[in-house]
Image: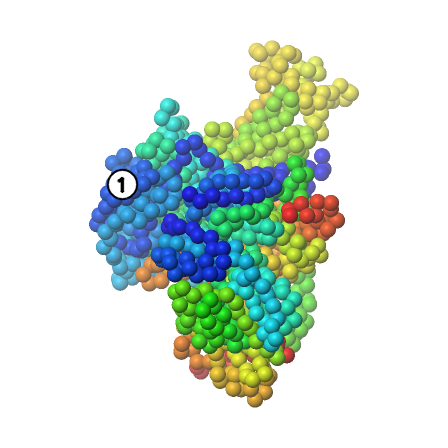
Amino acid sequence: MDATGIGAAVRRKEDFRFVTGKGQYTDDIHRPGETHIHFVRSPHAHAKIKSIDTKTAKTMPGVLAVLTGAELADDKIGNLICGWLIHSKDGSPMKMAPHPALARGKACYVGDPVAVVVAETLDAAEDAAEKIAVDYEVLPAVADPAEAQGSGAPQIHEIAPANTIYQWQLGDDKAVAEALKSAKHVTRLHIVNNRLVPNAMEPRAAIGDYDAGNDSFTLWNTTQNPHVARLVISAFVGVAPEHKLRVIAPDVGGGFGSKIFIYPEEIVCLWASKKVGRPVKWVADRTEAFIADAHGRDHVTEAEMGFDADGRITALKVKTIANIGGYMSTFSSSVPTYLYATLLSGQYDIPHIHCEVDAVYTNTVPVDAYRGAGRPEATFVVERLVEVGARELGLDPAELRRKNFIRKFPHQTPVIMAYDEGDYEASLKKALELADHKGFARRKRESERRGRLRGIGFSTYIEACGLAPSQAAGSLGAGVGLWESAEVRVNPTGSVEVLTGSHSHGQGHETTFAQVVADRLGIPIENIAVIHGDTDKVQFGMGTYGSRSAAVGLSAVVKALDKIEAKAKKVASHLLEAAENDIVFKDGKFTVAGTDKSAGWGEVALQAYVAHKFAGAQLEPGLKEGAFYDPVNFTFPAGCHICEVEIDPETGITSIAHWTAVDDFGTVINPMIVEGQVHGGIAQGVGQALLESAVYNKDGQLVNGSLMDYVMPRADNLPSFTIDTTVTKCPGNPLGIKGCGEAGAIAAPAAVINAITDAIGSEDLAMPATPQTVWAAIEKHRPGRMAA
Amino acid sequence: MPAVKLTVNGKPVTADVDPRTLLVQFLRENLRLTGTHVGCDTSQCGACVVHVNGKAVKSCTLLVLTADGADVRTIESLANGDKLHPMQEAFRENHGLQCGFCTPGMIMTAVDMVNRKGNDLDEKTIREELEGNLCRCTGYHNIVKAIAAGAKAMGGGTQAQAAE
Amino acid sequence: MYNFTYHRATGLRHAQNLLGKLDDPKLLAGGMTLLPTMKQRLASPANLIDLDRLEGLSAIEAKGRSVVIGALARHADVANSATVGEAIPALAELAGMIGDPAVRHRGTIGGSVANNDPNADYPAACLGLGATIITTKRKIPADEFFKGLFETALEPDEIIAKVSFPIPKKAAYQKFRNQASRYALVGVFVAKRPSEIRVAVTGAGSSGVFRVPSFEEALKKRFSPKSLEGLSVPPDGMASDIHGSAEYRAHLIGVLARRAVAAAG
């Protein structure tokens, strides 16, 4: 079984359909009689909607319906919600403004949907949309989070004075103030964590299909968590009751967080399908996606780190303004709070930490979780401070990190988290070796001979994944539990279906989940099917985000497998006429201990269903078990990434010369897939550090809202990566898994910026470090230009 | 509506089309060849790459009427039943895909790359040649590996020119 | 896309007749710019005249001291042409830097030159080499052809047939790509001709491709990167946007010009 079991680089079962073009993404699905919908979106960042005239549009050829927020309200369709309640430090609850799926009375960002046209063809819908006359009264707008609370900023929502959603804090501010006062050295940084557009390659899409015969709905949707979508759309938005709504996430082309959330478009497609009595299909254009998909990051932070005379960190103080955008997206409130401030201890033993976060509305696209979600922002703050601190103190950055590493586990940080296990020294040591750190000085000299600057940067990051113990999450304001479910169905022929509530949109569940089952049951991996992404098949699930599928989803599978094994042993005991306690199950075979009597997996599976060897009163027929697994703690993947850059000082172009990553993900199910996750994460982190940034102008217009202007990482922006792992098993779950999906995106930005600032000898550098930014930073600090 | 006549994956196809129809729309909607994807609207992403008269083109930026009379090959034409084309096999073997959305365009671009540049492709060449194809999942590392391996396999295999 | 009537031109004369006769017409060559623009509903021609099938307009020939390229030659054709590669390797290299491989299979030199995108590459080669744009009506020197952003000397019913590039003694093109679109943020074409030196810049100028007389003067004295040291282009008149400030663009012109001279040898 070694070739397909846990730890084997099994080639993916799902790939045949993808490499042959046989994947089935939402846009590939056609329903009989399908119609097409076009969203009319506000061209203004902030405007009163005085009236919407749809008369002419309704008469256009091929038009079936023209709908606005007024009809939505008439039909009592509820508002979108943010599902994590955060309280301000004064005890007041966050200020969640109403968020209708189609704007009513007011538009709050460029892209806010104000009306839709449903028509026979998309061209007809677009033609008619141009005939809708929306009378806007343009209002002043604010896009910059740092300006949102100022007296000059317009108030976006009545409920939120000074556009402030909450003023939250974590940690002991007095202890931090005292520690900073008595610190030998304090390093201070102003950090802008740039706003990103997720840009999964498959644009979001939805097909709403109302079945009048059964008064039920089906939604095909590009979602990472179909059950949560169903729950929110039924319980809060009220389009259909939960048992009358089926949500199907077919093949989904990447998500990175952006497909977690419940958006206006899927709600409107469902609702409109009942209105027109036909299926309604929406597929985003890429340019539309720029103003319709939740963005990520967008923090402005002031941070101070205190050090004692030995270079030990004594305190960390962080003040952050987080941009939430025009409305609160589904999980937006949790990202800059419990997914951010709780990670500010990094890999370090920091006695005192205090973090304040103001979340603000602005006239921009809503901001929510994007790969890493809060943890990249936290890591950037900590790893920049540590690096700059080391430089200011004249210490080797690796040495300063070593000096402060947490070495005893479990470790309680001052910001909620209790790290269960880790070995930060091990990953740093291995990374330094793999990166040939000793040879850096020589490589730097060699670069200098060619007129190039060379720099090296570290990022020893930690993340909290596998979200999360439901009770703990609930006490912190989560509106949902964060467990996962699994069902293992053994068929009479012995083949197995595994149903999981987690969801794959590129992660390879069909392979890794099957590996665990093959390993446990001793059956060929080909005989296992993994089923996910359909609320009619999987009873309930929380979906995939926060690097949780293996740590939480697979733990549920293991729990169900425990039950399967127990039941199968009972069946085997009847078949082999032995006591249940004497049955040993190993390598797919049931043996009576101490005898040569045995039965194969297939025989036992068949007997479970034919039920010829036991009476129903003794044992229930069948072999199918379900389990819900609620994690006991977060998991804490950690590692060390080292980035080496070379810069052309004349143009400011940064090339990544080497990338070394050594990560501790606990048990690895499939190293090939894990490496792939790390590669992709690094690329997104490098994108943030060097290339990507959603730029809003003063009027709240997204200036680079297309792939002609927003820079996505391309193959020639990146090197091949050197990847390795160290392993400390997670003690909190049965397989010892920590999770790997976000590590690269969390670690990478700080490593890149630490490397560039090392090369140019200045810390005055904002992300993304574009050639112009780097060139300007070099020019500004060039000797002889200091006065200018 | 004007008529169009072309050969798609070796089969003759005729249809009357709205002149606005792009080749990618024709493939996906008229012929239900949904392996060719649309990932952007500005010709950046390359998810829609197909071969027209033996050359890789972005089917989102070509009217089907312009392609009248052409020989069009899509991702669906590469495998021979269960037998994958060497480039498809190389993507599978090297984990050159995750969500699979960019993959058909990547593979069609890769086959075209080999047709033009030969079977011995170095990393720099491959990365430069991927200028018109975006992937958000893989960080390109394994795509580059897959293309190098696929290129070699195409040189050694009997179905080296299967795409053309 | 807005609806339009589609016309397939069978010859240059047919295309020109259609262009003169039809209401609100637009020529479609490779379509690499026009189609995305139409898809975004930013262009709405009533009549589209497809030039894709015109015979004999994609020839690439050496004629005396020039290389003459048919308007429908694809970028890939120019990049891979042995004729261009031998006579003006810098032009082949430039063509090989346009867009990406799939775009180069469709995009045409005529389409690019007629569009005169301020960030396109070909205008720099035309101006830098002192090319002549040969149309259905006349021959237009490059110096008189490019008239500003997306503006050219072409009359409404005039079609580019060929572009004739005089063979220089040496030449080179250096391009600094816009990282998103891969158009030229700044591109500098330097050519040493028997009679003159030309330095043409695309991407940087707020009104399109232009020459840099001060650089040309300096290089005339001695064709060496050293001759350009200390020389710069003032930021006034440079484009400025999120991809590059006027100062940065002006700075890059100097850097790329020096590198182009070095590359030209």
At label 1, the amino acid type is Thr
Categorize mark 1 by other alpha carbons within 10 Å: few (<14), some (14-19), many (20+): some
Measured as percent of width and height from the top left, residue C171 is found at: 59, 76
Q: Chain of mark 1?
A: A
Measured as percent of width and height from the top left, residue A307 is found at: 51, 65
Measured as percent of width and height from the top left, residue A48 is found at: 24, 52
Q: Residue sitting at 61 percent across and 27 percent down?
A: A496
Q: Is residue B21 above or below residue A309?
A: above
Measured as percent of width and height from the top left, residue A90 is found at: 31, 51
Q: How many marks?
A: 1
User: Mark 1 = which residue?
Assistant: A59
Left-right relation of A229 to A486:
left
Q: Quadrant of the N terminus of chain A?
A: top right
Left-right relation of B85 to A27:
right
Tell which of A445 and A336 is nearer to you.
A445
| Residue B107 seen in this snapshot | yes
Q: Residue sitting at 68 percent across and 67 percent down?
A: A438
Q: Quadrant of the C terminus of chain A?
A: bottom left
Find residue A703 and report its image quarter. bottom left
Q: Residue sitting at 40 percent across and 68 percent down?
A: C155
Specify the farthest residue to the left. Answer: A50
Tell which of A484 and C25 is nearer to you.
C25
Q: Is residue A196 above or below residue C69?
A: above
| Residue A706 seen in this snapshot | no
Q: Residue sitting at 55 percent across and 82 percent down?
A: C197
Find residue A272 and report its image quarter. top left
Task: State the SS at label 1.
Answer: loop
Specify the farthest residue to the bottom. Answer: C221
Left-right relation of B128 to A255:
right
Please name the colour scheme applied to the rendered image.
rainbow
